[in-house]
Amino acid sequence: GQQVMQIPQYQHVQEGEDFTTYCNSSTTLSNIQWYKQRPGGHPVFLIQLVKSGEVKKQKRLTFQFGEAKKNSSLHITATQTTDVGTYFCAGGSSGTYKYIFGTGTRLKVLA
Amino acid sequence: GAGVSQTPSNKVTEKGKYVELRCDPISGHTALYWYRQSLGQGPEFLIYFQGTGAADDSGLPNDRFFAVRPEGSVSTLKIQRTERGDSAVYLCASSPRPGAGGHEQFFGPGTRLTVL
């Protein structure tokens, strides 16, 4: 079945450093969503990408969807302690509203 | 406005018992998802409702799991003959009427199920 992997699994950065997490799907996606889950919390929607090669920015966050629509990345510039949490990608496929979540990247930011 | 609510927040049960987990989606949201999340893992898709019908139940692990949404709003996830391996956080998410390319999911706080 469809699998969605993320790397790295964990990332510790010093506050102010950049951070990137990568998401790879075993199948072509119709769209991809990104979520953030704080420790003890529930996933919170960040963004959705639909078009091949699409790039979207939200303040210090930059999201990219690959040309083949099988991979995506989230880049955070100048991390802050408020960025702590686990970042998940979730892949959607054509003809279904089912989403497959990635394995997640847990980010720790050291002040 | 009110978000997605789930009850109970915690449920402890014994192996072999029956449990029901409830989800109240955001008013007006037609799409509803159930996921299961184990510690350190991403949410695992269980079932998707569009209105009252289960449009995709391919994630239900076996026939001990069943979910209903009789009036297109509140949903109940039912687990029969619980097993220790069913212990996890069960998350519910709702979405507004779907548009092209998918739609944002609003998650509830989850129900933590512990099977002893």
Image: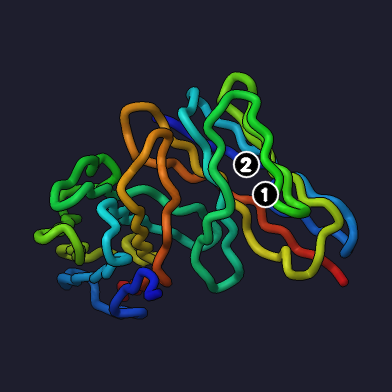
In the picture, the quarter occupied by the C terminus of chain B is bottom left
Q: In which quarter of the image is residue B25?
A: bottom left
Residue drawn at (48%, 28%), measured in percent from left and top? A29
- Which of the pair B62/B60 is nearer the observer? B60
Q: Any mark on residue B98, and which?
A: none
Q: Quadrant of residue B26?
A: bottom left
In the rendering, at what x and y percent does residue B30 appear? 25, 53
The subunit letter for the residue under badge 1 reads: A
Residue position for label 1: A9
Residue drawn at (58%, 38%), measured in percent from left and top? A5
Which secondary structure, mark 2?
strand
In the rendering, at what x and y percent does residue B4 appear? 36, 69
Residue drawn at (46%, 28%), measured in percent from left and top? A30
Q: Residues within 10 Å of mark 1 (few under 14, many from 20)?
A: some
Determine if marks 1 and 2 fall on one subunit.
Answer: yes
- Which of the pair A55/B55 is nearer the observer? A55
Decide if residue A33 is in sight here. Answer: yes
Which secondary structure, mark 1?
loop
Q: Which residue lies furthest to the top in this view?
A: A68
The subunit letter for the residue under badge 2 reads: A
In the rendering, at what x and y percent does residue B19 appear? 19, 71
Q: In this view, does A56 lie to the left or right of A14?
A: left
- Indicate the amino acid at tag 2: Gln
In this view, A101 is above or below A35 = above
- Indicate the amino acid at tag 1: Gln
Residue at mark 1 to residue at mark 2: CA–CA distance? 7 Å
In the rendering, at what x and y percent does residue B49 appear? 23, 49
In contact (CB < 8 Å): disc 1 and disc 2: yes
Q: Residues within 10 Å of mark 2 (few under 14, many from 20)?
A: many
Q: Is residue B45 left or right of residue A35?
A: left
Residue position for label 2: A6
